[in-house]
């Protein structure tokens, strides 16, 4: 494992230690309570900004603004105009992308090599939603009732959306929530993660610059147990779109019962990544490694259960471990760094706790296995890329979501048994296959209980292709036309003409 040296901190103008307000009804305002919280660089501990800390009263103000906009001027804005607004926002994101990617790196630690690679995805999502804006339509349906009765459907915006996002990809998560809301004519109150709120606030600035009317996009930073809970239970919110842990997802479902609001959930995972002996191992080694090590393992669909056919198990897992040892760990502002810090001290304690659990359970750490504290990294929350061999299905490191750069490598022999074991998890978000046999690829892909199956690749994503989970990984889809449908109601209209 290579360790990055100390580098000068770039003082981003949106992360220069100053105070950031929240956006409600087109105005930058303080929290009603006057409270603030700090956000710090997880690579160095340095203060980036203090941020207005929203709670129930601020959520009430933001939801009221969103309702006024939804029932007022915004309801009269035509699809072509909404499309233009999204295209203008896409242009602004493109113009400011280097700044936005750097802000993600500063606030949550992902290396610039990763955040800069999201240019096409971020801009592409906004332009995809812009295209969907003018493609929303109902149907004329021939019914079988006697007489002359004409029947058709309308697709209408669901209303005020409460959006709650995690910290592991603020730029793309923000766009994933506000893009379809604007496209469909909804309004949105966004609650970014307290660990990384700055990119969402900067996107809000760009939304105003694009001309998106007051109240259509509101951003209220705060903590999950206060602002997030108030948004999830609010009786004037028509839908909650949430990305995060399954435990929080369950609490949101319970909170939604008050007014039976629509809910879509993209939750955690413990995804299987399967390597058959006939795979192209030169491609599968880096592919399987970065299916977990990318973003320091802080990806809900990471392929953390690495199933390897017994005949190649020792060779393949050893090669993955050697690959992990060569990755450069350090401050994400260094363009050569491949592995940044975990987002917070709390996350560091969680991941290192699982490293201890894995070794107590009898797994062997072929690479990594602990915190990195060398030189300039001593002030940050760094964990070395870890590969555990000799993992059994019933070990906690094979069953529970760690959300860190930790691979649990598991041997298999029989394909039917493999599929049963791969599906033996409460989650079902992502999965991967590595094989040269196309028949085998189709057969196994069909049997895996997961929302995405990647064959000879991992984490491929596109704005037009839906993403979401089975089982405890949630329900609803993001990206694709299915995502837009999540923000619409269908109304049936009957007209008796004779």
Image: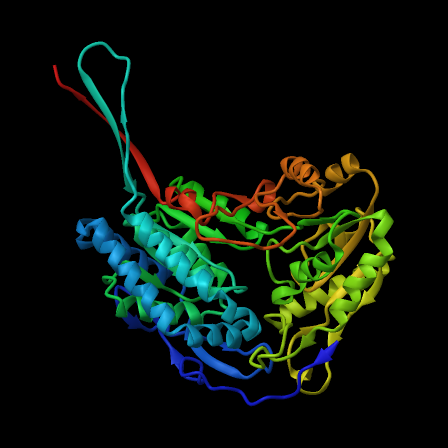
Q: Give the residue displayed 35% in from the left and 57% down from the top.
A: 127
Task: List x then y, in percent, for residue 455.
Answer: 64, 47
Nearer-the-camera pick, 430 or 349:
430
How are the residues colored?
rainbow
Seen in the picture, residue 272 relative to 299 is either above or below; the reply is above
Res. 68 visible in picture:
no
Task: List x then y, in percent, for residue 202.
Answer: 38, 72
Q: Give the residue displayed 61% in from the left and 45% down from the top.
A: 453
Seen in the picture, residue 104 relative to 434 is either above or below; the reply is below
Q: Quadrant of the N terminus?
A: bottom right
Seen in the picture, residue 376 relative to 367 is either above or below; the reply is below
Q: Is residue 274 left or right of residue 168?
A: right
Q: Is residue 388 left or right of residue 73?
A: right
Res. 155 visible in picture:
yes
Task: List x then y, in percent, for residue 212.
Answer: 25, 62
Taking the view exactly as shown, the residue that stands out farthest to the top is 146
Q: Quadrant of residue 63?
A: bottom left
Q: Quadrant of residue 493?
A: top left
Task: List x then y, in percent, for residue 250.
Answer: 54, 46
Nearer-the-camera pick, 114 or 396:
114
Nearer-the-camera pick, 362 or 315:
315
Taking the view exactly as shown, the residue that stands out farthest to the left is 498
> Exactly how many numbered labels are in the figure?
0
Q: Is residue 266 left or right of residue 320?
A: left
Q: Quadrant of the C terminus?
A: top left
């Amino acid at each position: 494992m290579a360790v990055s040296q100390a580098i000068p901190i770039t003082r981003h103008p949106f992360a220069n230690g100053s105070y950031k307000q929240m956006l409600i009804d087109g105005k930058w305002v303080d929290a009603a309570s006057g409270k603030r919280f700090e956000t710090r660089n997880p690579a160095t501990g340095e203060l980036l900004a203090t941020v207005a800390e929203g709670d129930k009263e601020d959520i009430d103000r933001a939801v009221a603004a969103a309702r006024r906009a939804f029932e007022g001027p915004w309801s009269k804005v035509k699809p072509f105009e909404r499309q233009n607004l999204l295209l203008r926002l896409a242009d602004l994101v493109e113009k400011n992308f280097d700044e936005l990617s750097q802000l993600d790196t500063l606030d949550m630690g992902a290396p610039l090599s990763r955040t800069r690679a999201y240019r096409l995805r971020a801009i592409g999502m906004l332009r995809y939603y812009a295209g969907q804006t003018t493609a929303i339509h109902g149907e004329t349906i021939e019914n079988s009732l006697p007489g002359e009765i004409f029947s058709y459907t309308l697709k209408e915006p669901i209303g005020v959306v409460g959006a709650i996002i995690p910290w592991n990809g603020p730029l793309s998560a923000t766009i994933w929530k506000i893009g379809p809301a604007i496209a469909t004519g909804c309004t949105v109150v966004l609650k970014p993660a307290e660990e990384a709120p700055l990119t969402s606030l900067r996107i809000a600035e760009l939304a105003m610059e694009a001309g998106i009317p007051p109240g259509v996009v509101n951003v209220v930073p705060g903590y999950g147990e206060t602002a997030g809970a108030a948004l999830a239970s609010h009786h004037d919110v028509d839908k909650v779109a949430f990305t995060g842990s399954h435990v929080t997802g369950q609490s949101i479902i319970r909170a939604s019962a008050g007014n039976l609001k629509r809910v879509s959930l993209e939750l955690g995972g413990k995804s299987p990544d399967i390597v058959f002996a006939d795979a192209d191992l030169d491609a599968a080694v880096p592919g399987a490694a970065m299916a977990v090590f990318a973003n320091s393992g802080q990806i809900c669909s990471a392929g953390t259960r690495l199933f390897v056919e017994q005949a190649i198990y020792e060779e393949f897992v050893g090669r993955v471990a050697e690959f992990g040892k060569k990755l450069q760990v350090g401050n994400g502002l260094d363009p050569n760094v491949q592995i940044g810090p975990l987002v917070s001290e709390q996350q560091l304690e969680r991941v290192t706790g699982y490293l201890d659990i894995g070794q107590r359970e009898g797994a062997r750490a072929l690479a990594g296995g602990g915190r990195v504290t060398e030189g300039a990294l001593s002030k940050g929350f760094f964990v070395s890329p870890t590969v555990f061999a000799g993992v059994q299905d019933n070990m906690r490191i094979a069953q529970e979501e760690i959300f860190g750069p930790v691979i649990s490598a598991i041997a298999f022999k029989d394909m039917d048994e493999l599929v049963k074991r791969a599906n033996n998890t409460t989650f079902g978000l992502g999965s991967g296959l590595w094989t040269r046999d196309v028949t085998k690829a189709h057969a196994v892909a069909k049997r895996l209980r997961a929302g995405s199956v990647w064959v000879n690749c991992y984490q491929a994503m596109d704005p037009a292709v839906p993403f979401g989970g089975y089982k405890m990984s949630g329900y609803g889809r993001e990206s694709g036309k299915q995502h837009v449908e999540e923000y619409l109601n269908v109304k049936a209209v009957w007209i008796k003409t004779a």
